[in-house]
Amino acid sequence: MPNSLIDFRDWSPTDLEKLFDLSFHIEKEKSVSSSGNHLLRTAALLFFEPSTRTRISFESACHREQISATVLSGKSGTSLEKGETLEDTVLNIAAMEPDVLIIRSGSELDLHQLRQKVSQPILNGGWGTHSHPTQALLDIRTLLKRGQKISDIRIVLVGDVKYSRVAHSHFELSRKLGYQVAVCGPREFLPSQSDVTVLEDIKSAMEWGNVLMMLRFQLERHQQTHRQNDWEKYQINLQKLKAWQEKGWLMHPGPINYGIEMDRDVESYPKNLIFEQVNSGLWIRRACLRTVLK
Ligand code: CP
């Protein structure tokens, strides 16, 4: 099994299957202490960008795996404020010998380059617009738990696909595992790859897909401002979902801009999996920790 997860390039379909199996096995374990083979391990969680779900679930996964977690959350109060670079910050923390580095950062840190410079495994907790592999894994695990077969999964990524690291990890993971992915959104928010199926509107997305993966409009990453009507055509609400109920799951990696990509009334949609995704994150991240710390 690979000793880091930055993206899926080193992970074979068999490695990924083992990871999913391990996450289901961990969920069935009766007590926290049954996994006591990682006593006295330490993890450094270096979250240079904001996070709720990923940071807390990695932290919680560490506690439940009996791994002591040290958390750096945000740049404030660190020597980054004195001009130290992100890479130097990570290298200094790596010198304190944590057993694993869990990192969320912007693109200014090169995780592949960093991997050559540290001896510890690296787990990517969301890297710029490049990748967010544990999010893609937890999304697929959520669908597996609901009985979907991988080969039947057809995910439509809706909205701000271009800037979405979750979308980029799904493009990569879908090629490894064999599920289908399409995109739907305003033209300027779509990725430049020519090999991605583009669906013109939500109606076509619902006809093609069995999962709508709504994506947050990442206004903080955009160079220019956009008019609201650029994206309101792609908004989802309960009324639109009702016609589709038998066929499709609603997902969103969070955080959600209610009123922009979705109305709040989608909370009552029976096939809304958003909190199940969050729950899956715990088991996937425990499985990742156990895999790279073997
Ligand atoms: N999905 C996700 O990465 O959420 P956070 O930014 O809250 O971690």
Image (tube, helix red, strand yellow):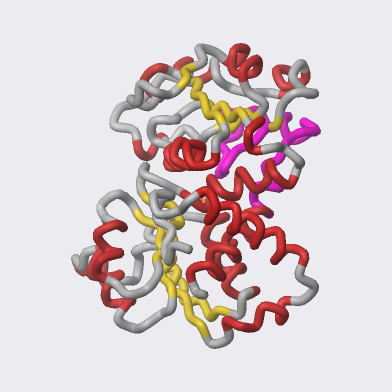
- Residue 73 visible to an observer of this rendering: no
Residue 18, image quadrant: bottom right
Outermost residue on the front side: it is 14
Which quadrant of the structure image shows residue 58? Answer: bottom right
Q: Where is 112 relative to 189, above or below?
A: below
Residue at 55 percent of width and 29 percent of height = 180
Residue 266 lies in the magenta-colored region: yes
Q: Position of residue 23 (x, y in %)?
A: 65, 60
Q: Residue at x 58, y 86 (%)?
A: 39
Is any atom of residue 209 visible in this view? yes
Residue 21 position within the rendered picture, expressed as x and y whole percent measured from the top left: 66, 57
Q: How many marks are shown on the rendered structure?
A: 0
- Judging depth in this view, the residue of 20 and 221 nearest the camera is 20
The magenta stretch spans residue 183: no
Note whether 192 is above or below 19 in the view shown: above
Q: Residue at 51%, 37% (x, y): give it.
A: 174
Q: Is residue 253 left or right of residue 145?
A: left
Task: Reply above or below: 35 against 259.
Answer: below
| Picture coordinates of residue 165, whole percent (x, y) | 42, 42
Q: Does 266 sit left or right of 52 as displayed?
A: right
Percent from the top left, x then y, of residue 83? 19, 65
Most extreme residue toward the bottom is 40
Q: Nearer the viewer, residue 211 or 153?
A: 153
Residue in the picture at 72% in, 79% down: 34
Question: Is 86 in front, or is 220?
Answer: 86
What range of the chain is rendered magenta? 250-279
